Amino acid sequence: MDFINNYDVGALTGYKTKGVVKYFKKLDNTKELIELLKHASKKDIPVVPFSGGTNILINNNYDGLFVSYVDDTIKEVPSKDDTVLIKAGASVSKEDLVNYCSKKGYSGLEFWAGIPGLVAGGVAMNCGAYKSETKDVVHEVELCSTEGATTIKGNAMNWAYRSSGIPKNTVICSCTFKLKKADASKVQKQCEEYVEDRKKKHPLEYPSCGSVFKNPENSNKGAWELIKDAGLCGFRIGGAMVSDKHSNFIINYDNAKAEDVIRLIEEVKKRVELNSGIKLHEEIKIY
């Protein structure tokens, strides 16, 4: 197999910290993708589907394969009622898909407005905001694995909080969303309001991977509140800092290294548990 060897994927991720992967492959053919996954399996090479990297932190070096499937098409599937099916390729950006839907007047993905990253990543982690989750609008997902290509209905997937339940070494190739036909101006207005809200609340001027921790199930407080209560706003380790604008964001404040971010994550978990008795768990993926 023809790979890019020792590729600095970290430069593409949300934190912009150095993160070298042993093998990197970008491809746009499902047959080649399946052969690649079979090859990696035979060689015992761990595989990570790479979809924009907005929720990934690489701890300097990763001894495995990052694979990026490229399909940036958006297609409409004919529908007779007040719903519409929109099929989006894995590498379509959330921004482009939201813009497409808002102009057409297709409602359901407004909560994605202002969230960075690609479609595959949003589906894989069941991205959610404003009391909505991706699973609510997924009709079906096309997947590739060592077993071949398959399509799974949205209601047959093992959804969970910030998880789609897709097995390891499985790559999302496309997703079809079931949306509602609506007034385009209202859809656009809602998207604009969400974008403005994010600008006000989130430290978008600094590199980050967004919310670091999941909201705990055993607490009536969100992760950001627990972190703030522990007095950690503005707390720094190296070039990484807990944002004083949104305490569930750890930002690359001053040329942070991956280990700065990781050490800060561990310190936040430790201090929050000491202060509240609540254990926080990462939403971001660390490799």
Image (tube, helix red, strand yellow):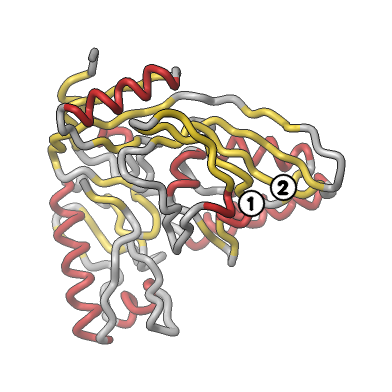
Closer-to-camera residue (232/54): 54
Q: Is residue 244 above or below residue 194?
A: below
Q: Amino acid at mark 1?
A: Val
Mark-to-mark CA distance, 2 and 1: 6 Å
N-term-proximal mark, 2 vs 1: 1
Say left or right for 135 vs 262: right
Where does the N terminus fall, quadrant-wise?
top left
Q: Are marks 2 and 1 in contact (CB under 8 Å)?
A: yes
The residue wearing badge 1 is 137
Total marks shown come to 2
Occupied quadrant, residue 49: top left
**Whole-percent x, y for residue 112 in the image:** 57, 50
| Residue tagged 2 | 179
Q: Position of residue 130 (x, y in %)?
A: 58, 64
- Nearest the viewer among 49 and 280 is 49
Specify whether 179 is left or right of 67.
right
